[in-house]
Amino acid sequence: MPCQLVENAATRRSFRLGLHFSDATIQMSDKTKLIRNLTIIGVCLLLGAFGLIIKWPRHQTTAEAPKLSAGELSALIAKAEQNDASAQTALGSAYALGNGVKQDYRQAATWYQRAAAQGSTVAQNALGELSEAGQGVPQDNAQAANWYRRAAEHGLATAQYNLAALYAVGRGVTLDNREALKWYLQAANQGDSLAQYNVGMRYSEGHGVAPDLAVAYQWLSLSAAQGLPDASQALAALKSRMSSEQLSRGRELLRSFKPQTMSAASH
């Protein structure tokens, strides 16, 4: 049975504020928001460790998290101790959540670090989130950016989005709208709805890029099609500013869009 993930923009918005064009409103995630994200990573990696078909999580997803039985936990620990990166990442999430074990963010970070050293982008991104939240490791936005960058450079959309959000407000990195747009675009091209929203708004208003209403239309339409209410509202407002020529070009860009996918090997 595959891990069922439900796209929910409101969940991701609550996990990382400042996702919208008004990036200056970004705030630190609290424990509840962090746990919500790690729940999905842990559940899906656990299923993957046992050879089940999964869809890889993003920070926009929600799912019911089954509690680990003693047998499942023992099997997971055994695989993790055998240096299985997916199991190590899943065990890190179990410690972060207190799922089958006593909650321990330091242990979570330890297992994430072992997986990250093997190139697990999910673990690298999780370490970025722990560093940003100051959970199990010292609070360090620059270190968070470093972890996000490692995962982002290997194609993980979650990390690309997280890194973009830091550049958008200058947290742990120098504020840079062009760099923020670069990483938002990479996540958006993989189908990340909130990244698509951010790209659309930036093209609409000319932040980090010259204004282009047709391109803004493309990205806001893609985001709105995934059910993001803010994108639908922004799209309606955008249409009132567009000429017929701009609208025609925007629709053509929308029709020609083909989402990109990352290599499964980098998980």
Image: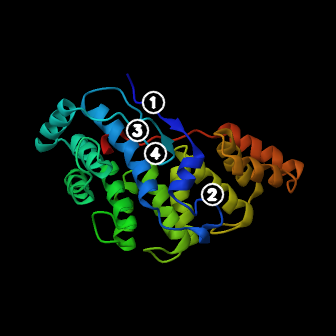
> Which circle's residue, 3 or 1, is located before the other in the chain?
1
Residue that badge 2 annotates: 198
Residue that badge 4 annotates: 58
Could you tell me residue 266's position as x and y percent?
A: 32, 45
Asked whether the viewer can see residue 67, the reply is yes
Instruction: State the separation of the CA atoms marked 4 and 1.
Output: 12 Å
> Which circle's residue, 4 or 1, is located before the other in the chain?
1
Q: Which mark is residue 4?
A: 1
Judged left or right of residue 46, residue 165 is: right
Residue that badge 3 annotates: 56
Instruction: State the separation of the CA atoms marked 3 and 1.
Output: 10 Å
Q: Quadrant of the C terminus?
A: top left
User: Which residue is outermost to the front?
Assistant: 102
Q: Are marks 3 and 1 in contact (CB under 8 Å)?
A: no
**Amino acid at circle 4:** Arg
Q: Are marks 4 and 1 in contact (CB under 8 Å)?
A: no
Q: Nearer the viewer, residue 184 or 56?
A: 56
Q: Residue at x 16, y 42 (%)?
A: 80
Disc 4 crowd rating (10 Å Cα; few below 14, some 14-19, many 20+) is many
Q: Nearer the viewer, mark 4 or mark 1?
A: 1
